[in-house]
Structure formats: C-alpha cells, structure tokens
Amino acid sequence: MININKFLSQIFNQEHLIEYRPIVDKINSLRPELRQLKNEELKKKSQFLQEKVDKGISLEVILPEAFAIIREVSKRVIGLEHFDVQLMGGIALHKGKIAEMKTGEGKTLVATLPAYLNSLLRKGVHIVTVNDYLAKRDSEWVGEIYRFLGLKVGLIQNFMNKDERKKNYLADITYVTNSELGFDYLRDNLVKSVDEIVQREFYYAIIDEVDSILIDEARTPLIISGQSNIIDEKYKICCEIVKELHKGAHYEIDHKYRNIILKDKGIVKCEELLNINDLYDIKDPWAPYILNALRAKELFQKNVHYIINNNQIIIVDEFTGRIMPGRRWADGLHQSIEAKENLEIQKETQTLASITYQNLFLLYPKLSGMTGTAKTEEAEFNKIYNLEVIVIPTNKPMIRKDLSDVIYKTEYYKWNAVLSECKENYSKGRPVLVGTTSVEKSELISSLLKAANIPHQVLNAKPENAEREAEIIAQAGRKYSITIATNMAGRGTDIILGGNIDYLAKSNLQFIYKSFIQKNNNDINFNCIYDTLIKPFDINLSYETKEVLKNFIINLKQYLNNINISEIDFEEKLILASKNLNQSDYLCIEIKKAYQSLISEYKIKFLKEHDEIIRLGGLYIIGTERHESRRIDNQLRGRAGRQGDPGSSRFFLSLEDSLLKTFGSDRLISLMNTLKLEDSIPIESSFINQSLESAQKKVESFYFNSRKQLFEYDKVLNTQRQIIYSERKKILLSDDNLLKKIVLEFILSSIDDCLASHLANEYNKKLNYQNKDNNNIVILFEDLLSLSNKFSNYLIDNIEVNGVRYFFHEQSLVNYELKSSLINKLEIGLMSDIERYFLLEQIDNEWKEHLKQISNLQETIGWRSYGQKDPLIEYKKESFNLFIKLIIQIRHNFTVSIFRFIPLLKDYEAIKQM
C-alpha cells in the first residue's frame, strides 16, 4: 500500500531540487572567471558584494556569485571545493530549510555558503553546534575561509567571561553550542546593567545536528537556578525508606511515562515508617521525596543515565552518549540520586529563568539546520518550527548494505554473537564499529574483547574516554580497528577508511611539542620521538622525512629555549601551518615542513590500507540494541558508506532488550518455542524488522506528543516571558526621561490597581461607596505612597470615584517630585539609578515567584481532565490570572519601595555598583 504522505513528500522534495539546479549551474558558470583572479582581486569581489547589499540589493540576486566566491576561496584556503550537491545544501539552508545530508557529505563545508551570504547583512550569523569541540574545530578550520575575505569569526566556549562573549557575539559569524547560546540568552535577561548584555538581536541561525538539538534536547528546558538556603535531610531519610518498599506490592512502574505509581499499601507503609498521619500533608509534604527516591531507585541507573565523577552525579545525554557537566535534574530528582549514591547532597535550587529550545530558536527571524537524519521527524519540524526537510542526494551513490536484524532469546547469546563477529572481522583486518546504548553496555563488550585478547578502543561518556574522542574516531577506519562507542550523534569527525592522515600528522607534531614541555629539553631527541611516536603505527619513514623531523626537533628545541609558547598557541600555529596559505611566522614555516613531510609519508601507507579495507567490504557497523528512535539507529549506520565507500551494518538484538521487552517480546518467545529453536539460534526476518520499526514509530509518536505538549504549555509562558523581558530591556536601555515616564506609569497604575481592588471589595459586600469607607481607602493609599498627612478632610461625602483617583494621582506626583528633588541633591541622576535598581529588583523577584507558581500549576492542572475540562485551556486561564497578579504585584512593590526609600550610605553604594 502506498503511503500518500511519503509519496507527496518525495514529490515536493524533487520539486525543490529541480528549482535549485539552475542556481547551481549559474554558480558553476562563474568558476572559470574566479579561478583567474588573484587573492586580492577575489577579496575585492567580496567587498563589491558587500557594497551591493548595503545599497539594498537582495541576497537572492547575489547568491550565485557569493556561493561561487566561497567555493573558490575554500579551494585555495583549505584545499576543499564544494560539490554540486553541497551547493544545493547551501541553497536549502539559505532558504530556511533543513538539509538532510548523509554522514561524510561535508555538512560543515556546506554551512559556509549561507553563513557568508547572510553575514553580508551585518546582523550576525550563528552556527550552532552540539559541543565545544565542534564549535572550536569549525571556527578554526572553515573559519579561515571567512577570515580570508575579511570577515570576523567568533567562538563561544564554556570558560569565556562576559567581555569575551560580547566580542565574539559581535562577530560576523559566530560558532556557539546550543546550551551556551540558551544560557547566555537567559543570563542577558537577568543582568542589572546594559553593559553586561553579551548578545545582540538574533537574526539567522544554522543548526548543525538539528534533529539532536530541536528534537532530542527539546524535552528538557534550559533552566538557570539559584540555591535555596537549606539542605533538606528528607532526601536521605526517603532513600532509606524506599529500600523497605517492594515493586508490585507497594508501587508500580510506568516505563512509558518514566513515572512511579504509589499504591495504597505503599502509602500506608511509608506513613508507618515515617510515623506521620498524611504523606500528602500540604504543610509538611513527604510524597514528592518518596516518589523521587523511588524514581532514583528504579528508573535511573548508574553508567546508563549518569556517571559519578569527582564525587558528583554527571548526567549522560541518552541521545549523544556525552556527559553534560553542570546540568542537574530538577524538582529534587538530582538530590534523590545523590542520596542513593551516598554522595553529598547539594542544595535545592529555585528557578530564576527558563526557556525551551523550541521557543529559544523560534526567536530567530530566519532559521535553518542540517543533519544526516531528519526525514523521520519531518512532521514535527513542520508543525513546531515551520521548517521543511529537503533530502539532498549524495555526491556518490550509497552502496552500504543494511542487513536484517538478528534476534536471540537471551542477552548472553547476543553478546556471544557480537564477540564472534568482532573476532571474525578482526582476523581479516576489517574495521568494526560496535554501537551501544550506554556506558554499562560498552564496558561489557570491552571486557569480552579483553578476555579474547582483541585490541580495541572505547568511546563513551567517561571523561578518560571522552577526552580522546577525536583521536578514537579519526582512526576507527584503520585496518584491524575495533571501536566500541555509545550513540554517534554529533561526533563531528568522519571515519575514513585507512585512517585520517591529517589528524595523525597533527597529533604527532603536538606529541613532539608536549614532549618538550613535559620533559627536560636536553633529553629529547629524534630516536626518543621515533620509538614512541612512529613505530607503533608500523610506518617506516623515508630518509628524507626522518631528516625533516630531525631538523624540526632541533629547531623547535631552540625556539622553545628562547620563547615560551602555550599549548593553545602551538595548536593554532599547527592549524595555520596545515592550510594552503603562505606563512611568514618562523615556527609556522617549520611546522608546515614537518606536517607536509608526514602527510606525504602517511598518504602512501594509508592509501594502500584504504584499498585493502575496501576489498574487505569497508567499515562494518554492529548495533547491539535498537534505540527508541530510528534516527539514532540511522546515525550509527551512517558512519559506514561515506562518499561512495562500501560498508555494511547489522543489529544484534535479544528478547531481553528494553525495546523488545516493551513491544511484543512475548509473541517472539512463543514463536521461538513453537519452532523449538535453541537459545543460541537467532531469528532473522523482514517481518521482525517491520515490527521493530513499527514499535519505534509508536515511541517516536509518543515522544512527539510529549514535546508538543511541553511546547504548547511553554508557549503560554513564553508570551509572558517576552513581555517581562521586553519591559526589562526597555528599563535597561532607557534614558532618564523615558525612565521617569515608566516610573510614573507604574506609580499611577498602582494607585488605579488599589482603587479597583478596594471598590471590588465594597461591591462584593453590596455596600455603596460612601464617606464611612473613606478612612479605609485613605489608610490604603497612605501606606502605598508613604504619605504623612491625613487626607480625610479632603474626601467629602459621596465623592465620585474619579475624584478620589484624581486626588491621589495628584498627591503621588507631588510626593514623587519632592522625593526626586531631595535625592538628586545628593548626586545628579541618583534618582534614576535608584528607580532602575528597584524596577529590575522587583521584576526579577516577582518573576522568580511566578515561575514557581507556574511550575506548581503545571504539576496539578492535569487533574482538571477528571472534571471533563481541557487541562491546556484551564492552564491558559489560570496562568493568565497569575500573570495579571504578577504585574499588579510588581507595580505595587515598586511604588512602596520608591516612596519608602531613604538613601543610607550602604544602599547608595549598592546602587552605584550596578
């Protein structure tokens, strides 16, 4: 049966590619002309394009010439020239689409095309990556293309201070991770001074590994938290309590929603052990602590969901397999896991600011992304982000063979089969990549390989392995390589059959430099370097290369004796030396000689190895468990078959795997028993593959609905967030005159709020507004405005409401001017500093409380469905009412603060420090 949606999607995709073809032909037609230009003439061409854009010429008009210039510069600077399919990918990105391009098709290079074109608008382009390593690598590598044309390239890294961040965000093109981008946005909306803002207005973002960022990480909002004052001992107590509770008898586990359901027996048992009457007592609640302790016990496993490093719980990203330092689970879950592992329990936190990735990236007027796996999530990209997915054809035909899954009855036989596959392929010399879903499983297969004396590399979330990520992946395509890795999303380094000679040459030269730094210079010589560096790779260097390396070691020794150079500086010089650029720096010239000599030497050896591996069938991918998402499986498979290389992939599964446990393992066990198959004999059929894919689609659909619900709820909060942040920014950027208008508006509105509240109370009592109530309202306004006079004499019987309103408006303005005049006598402009301080302080404090109330509302609103009410509609109503109260409270608190304020010396100093 034809899938209509899939069929229509293919037609639309083809229409886009047909639309792009004439543009590609136009770009190609400019190639001969640009090849004739000298470097300076090429730069002038770029300046001419900039002038066109400044005059109002649209980017669409200059796109062919801009892309042609970038392609020519790329060839000259980094030695790579864009293929036609890469040009198509660049066009798709410029038009605000998602370009799906297979692994190894050069997505990093593709991004240079739209990034350069859109940077000509001088609004800043953000290229968003999944980790600091990729951001740094790309900014240094392809950043040379932009620098050649006179553009400024920025890089945001975790350790940077505010001044460095501001400078880098002001660059024409900035490389940044998704988390740094999000946290900088939130921090910018918490600052007390405009000088502390680091980001400028968002314009255009290109997201690398877009599915990982906008789909996988969209489940968890970014949160900036502040610590509370106490550490709660309840976590430790509840950790001990739940050891007495038993699954089935006292509680049930909801694996689908990753939740715990406490039974009546469980509630009674907990109350007995705690010696309390009510587990759900609002004044002293124990239920959240018990439920978190049970979640920590049953749903969060060490070396799967987290690792322990330096006595701290470090979250492992289930999609990328990377650790996430600094991230913590919310709502007390992290503290419960710390209690479970007998670690020091850190203080509870309170949310100061938060945003989801959906709403963060929707702040960009123009958005695009690239990945190797996006088509399976096309519906979500379209509905949430209004992004189309364009599948870009591969430069060379894909010839990888994806073999049918094999399913064993137990995990024991599955792992034996994986071990046998590794042994067989290792004996031939064929490289193997074994994909696992957790640290625990990667260490299991590693121990099996060690027992069989098979050399291998492990890449997982453990810091000692993660630090060698680039090195491990770069050489995973070498002969006899066995590499075990957790999920392969966003690894950033291609697995090249035969090995990555560029990486090896650079790492060898870095090793030589480090040898000098770590040891006495006089102890370092060529033989020492050769024995530890070259021999392990079984490469016999030619006499010429040996002489070049000997000279390099001698010259480097002399250079370091005279000039101290940091590891980072050496690395930068090494990157420059590897480019096709003329160098004037002495050390760069020496590094370049050694680098080119090693490259020439390795190329001969590695090309021979490359051909041998191709004859063996290319890289062999072994999956050891199906992931909940088909994309993650496809990312693993995608490591083989790059740029037309051969390769194959196969998944080895067992009925004890989590996905099969949840979906249909009983039927398969029944089938195996009916066929009377031995446990060591696997099942292999296309029907099972279809069933697994169907199960994955169900899980994907469930998570999509979960993310959609999160998005719908956060969309309500996002509207409020934008109002608060925009008001905050207006206060920060306003001059004294505008600030005074804002202040007076707050004060007068606060008076109106009080009057409205007073009248509402009177109407509720069904009383007329008469003189006997004047004393109440006088007291109310005297308290609000800190007025020392009594105004009862001025409020005659049956005075109109508007008269009361007008009277207090007048009194507040008089009192404000007196206060302002008094304070400005201390120092001109001091009143504005005080006003700005109080405004921001009240907004931040009340917003923090509002976020807490919204969080509580989100937790409880679902119960409204039992009353036949739509929780989302109810949430919108309740959150709106809370927001109105928030605005009223901010205005009230500010008005009270400004009129009661008496400038003491310590307050004055605090304000001046803003």
Image (cartoon, rainbow, N blue to C red):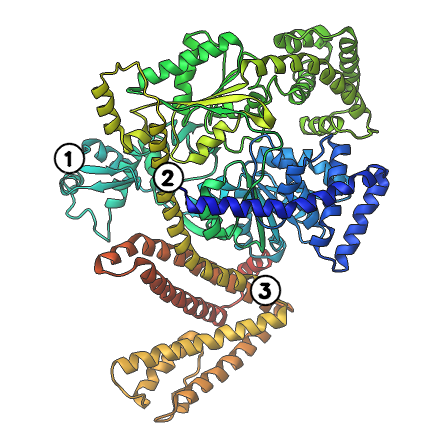
Q: Residue at x 33, y 62 (%)?
A: 873
Q: Is residue 414 above or below residue 2?
A: above
Q: Is residue 80 above or below residue 524?
A: below
Residue 785 vs residue 338, the one in the foreground: 338
Task: Determine crowd level at label 2: few under 14, some 14-19, many 20+ residues with C-alpha closer than 10 A.
Answer: some
Q: Nearer the viewer, mark 3 or mark 1?
A: 1
Proximity of marks 2 and 3: CB atoms separated by less than 8 Å: no
Amino acid type, label 1: Ala
Q: Residue at x 35, y 24 (%)?
A: 685
Amino acid type, label 3: Asp
Residue 575 vs residue 611, the one in the foreground: 611
Name the residue that disc number 3 marks. 833
Label 2's element? Answer: helix
Spatial CA span between label 3 and label 1: 62 Å
- The percent coordinates of residue 308 (x first, y second) are 41, 28
Label 3's element? Answer: helix
Spatial CA span between label 1 and label 2: 33 Å
Task: Determine crowd level at label 3: few under 14, some 14-19, many 20+ residues with C-alpha closer than 10 A.
Answer: some
Is residue 155 in view from this perspective? no
Q: Tell me the quadrant of the picture where the C terminus can be found.
A: bottom right
The image's mark for residue 697 is: 2
Name the residue that disc number 1 marks. 249
Q: Is residue 272 left or right of residue 565?
A: left
Task: Determine crowd level at label 1: few under 14, some 14-19, many 20+ residues with C-alpha closer than 10 A.
Answer: few
Using the rendered view, name the quadrant where residue 784 is placed: bottom left
Q: Tell me the quadrant of the picture where the N terminus can be found.
A: top left
- The percent coordinates of residue 29 (x first, y second) are 77, 42
Q: Residue at x 81, y 23 (%)?
A: 589
Is residue 415 in view from this perspective? yes
